[in-house]
Amino acid sequence: MSGSRSSGAQVPPATASGDRLAVIASHLSSYGLGSPANMAGEKDAALAAEPVGGPTIFDKIIRKEIPSQVVYEDQKILAFRDISPQAPIHIIIIPKVKDGLSRLLKAEERHIEVLGSLLYGANIVAKQEGLEDGFRIVINDGPNGCQSVYHLHVHLLRGRQMNWPPG
């Protein structure tokens, strides 16, 4: 599907597919960027979600086992609206093939093309969303970077002032 756009239903909260999905669903529905107290909760969720080797929630979204509101998809990436947005526009962009990219720190020279595809995909999505005057790209990496899903992903955010760094 080359550069297709799709509208889907809002994603329901994760169900009893395991404790890890429950932690992620809880995390996604409760944290907010900018607040030190909420950042502590985000870090706790990230620490609880360290990689366990099985499929991630993003793998399940790619396989259409979990519904998502897709805004862009091509052969390499999938972009969808976050189920618990931290800004009026909050889109997650993921590579369709993980190839060991559970986090940015795992990137190797062979990943240059997919890393470029993620950022170029953010460019396409930003234009689709009418964000030519600006937006924010965030990549959380590892437990101390508040990463809660160990499948490399990019957050495209826009729409409110975010106080960063907290405190």
Image (cartoon, helix red, strand yellow):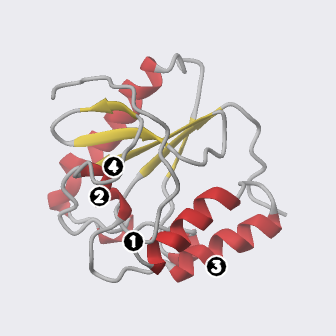
- For this view, does 167 lie left or right of residue 125? right
The residue tagged with tag 4: helix, strand or loop? strand
The amino acid on which the numbered mark 2 sits, given as a three-letter code, is Lys
Judging by the rendered image, the residue that carries numbered circle 2 is: 60
Is the residue under label 1 in contact with that under label 2 (CB below 8 Å)? yes
Judging by the rendered image, the residue that carries numbered circle 1 is: 17
Judging by the rendered image, the residue that carries numbered circle 4 is: 94
- Tag nearer the camera, 4 or 1: 1
- Residue plotted at (59% across, 26% down): 134
* Residue 128 badge: none
The amino acid on which the numbered mark 4 sits, given as a three-letter code, is Ile
- For this view, does 40 lie left or right of residue 147? right
Vertical comparison of 99 with 72: above or below = below
- Residue 45: % across, % down: 59, 74
Mark 2–mark 1 distance (CA, rounded to whole Å): 11 Å
The amino acid on which the numbered mark 3 sits, given as a three-letter code, is Asp
